[in-house]
Each structure stands twice: as structure tokens, then as C-alpha cells.
């Protein structure tokens, strides 16, 4: 599971460019620590190239007030809630790392290294009562994650973004890909 992530334009030039693209298009994604139901920056298909916008993180759940923020990538093509979206409306969450909690409730921040590198997470979106909303995909954890949690985000490299968004065959193959090794640091909060 991935319950929160960071979007820090002031800490990362690439995220600053992504943030500015959203602003230039009239969107105002939240910055800092992103919580479920926040409007976050997303990379989506455009007419000729990808574009950046802001969208609510989380599909409506089955109970009032519930939000579904993650979907298992391994079953997304079969699950009625996600199947149409993963086939037709894939997106990418640009982040500067994500958080996970272990069984002892200690909070850990994950990224490629100590600095706020850009980390891209695969997702999809759809409209609910005319409002676009998104979920991110999770997968089985690798060695860098398994001691903390039994799921991890489906992480793309920068060069895989266009393929994830536009290429159906790539998307179907990618959901079973090995994830990159990450580093973690305990957060004192």
C-alpha cells in the first residue's frame, strides 16, 4: 500500500517543471506531503504528447466517506472497478518519494537515495459524477521494501512514462515487472 507521498517542487528541479506545467494549464496541485483525497499533479495522455494536470487522489469507496487510493496491479485488468481505466486512462504520479508504515507504526520515507529524487508511480483515473479521480497501482514488494510492508508502488522510470500511458501491450507486461531497489529512512513524526 502507499498511503502518502511527497510532491516537492522547491526540492527538485524536475518536479518544479512538472508543477509549473500544471500551473500554466490552470491547475493548482497540492505540494508537500500528499494525502488521500488531495488534488495532486498527474501526467496523463494529451492530444500529441503527455500533459500535466491536477486530480483528486482516490476513487469513491463502497461506504460513505471511504476512498480507494491503491489498486493491485496484478488484478487491475480483471477488476470491474479498474479494468476500463487501466485500459483507457492510465496516468503517472510524479513524486519525490512515498511513505509506508511498518507493523510497529513507524513511518518510513522511500526513494532512490537520500535526496528528493523524482520517483514516478503508475496509476489510472476515471470520472465520478463528472469529477476525475485517480488511484495508484501497487505490486509485490522487493527486498528493499519487504521488511517494512507487503506491498509497494508500481514504479516507472522516466523513459517508461510514455509507454505506460500510450502503449497497451507495455502496460500489460509492465505490471509484472521487477521494481527498482529503494532506500528508506525512518521519519520521526
Image (cartoon, rainbow, N blue to C red):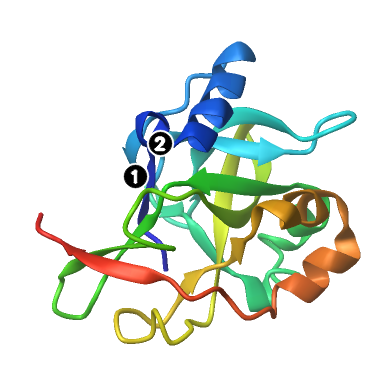
**Residue drawn at x 66%, y 60% as measured from the top left:** 81
Question: In which quadrant of the rendered image does the N terminus lie?
Answer: bottom left
Measure the C-alpha gap from mark 1 to mark 2: 6 Å
Residue wearing tag 2:
38
Please tell me in which quadrant of the rendered image residue 110 appears. bottom left
Residue 57 horizontal/vertical position (percent): 49, 43
In the visual, does 175 lie left or right of 139? right
Q: Quadrant of the C terminus?
A: bottom left
Residue 188 placement (x, y as % from top left): 9, 58
Pointers 1 and 2 in contact (C-beta within 8 Å) = yes
Say whether residue 26 is visible: no
User: Within the image, what quadrant is residue 75 found in?
Assistant: bottom right
Q: Name the one closer to the observer, 50 or 72.
A: 50
Is 38 displayed left or right of 20 in the figure? left
Residue located 62% across and 34% down the image: 132
Q: Does 112 appear above or below 174?
A: above
| Placement of 123 over or under 22, stated as above or below | below
Quadrant assignment, res 187:
bottom left
What label sits on residue 35 in the rendered view?
1
Q: Residue at x 68, y 60 (%)?
A: 82
Image coordinates of residue 26 in percent, x first then y, are 59, 12
Amino acid at each position: 500500500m502507499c498511503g502518502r507521498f511527497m510532491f516537492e517542487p522547491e526540492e527538485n528541479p524536475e518536479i518544479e517543471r512538472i508543477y509549473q506545467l500544471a500551473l500554466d494549464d490552470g491547475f493548482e496541485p497540492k505540494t508537500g506531503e500528499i494525502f488521500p483525497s488531495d488534488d495532486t499533479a498527474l501526467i496523463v495522455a494529451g492530444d500529441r504528447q503527455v500533459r500535466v494536470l491536477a486530480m483528486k487522489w482516490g476513487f469513491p469507496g463502497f461506504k460513505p466517506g471511504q476512498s480507494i487510493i491503491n489498486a493491485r496491479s496484478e488484478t487491475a485488468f480483471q477488476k470491474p472497478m479498474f479494468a476500463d481505466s487501466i485500459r483507457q486512462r492510465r496516468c503517472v504520479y510524479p513524486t519525490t518519494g512515498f511513505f509506508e508504515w511498518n507493523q510497529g507504526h513507524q513511518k518510513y520515507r522511500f526513494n532512490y537515495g537520500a535526496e528528493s529524487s523524482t520517483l514516478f508511480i503508475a496509476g489510472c483515473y476515471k470520472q465520478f459524477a463528472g469529477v476525475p479521480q485517480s488511484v495508484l497501482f501497487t505490486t509485490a514488494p522487493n527486498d528493499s521494501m519487504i521488511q517494512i510492508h507487503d506491498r509497494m508502488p508500481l514504479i516507472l522510470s522516466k523513459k517508461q512514462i510514455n509507454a505506460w500511458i500510450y502503449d497497451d501491450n507495455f502496460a500489460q507486461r509492465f505490471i509484472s515487472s521487477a521494481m527498482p531497489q529503494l532506500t528508506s529512512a525512518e521519519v520521526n513524526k
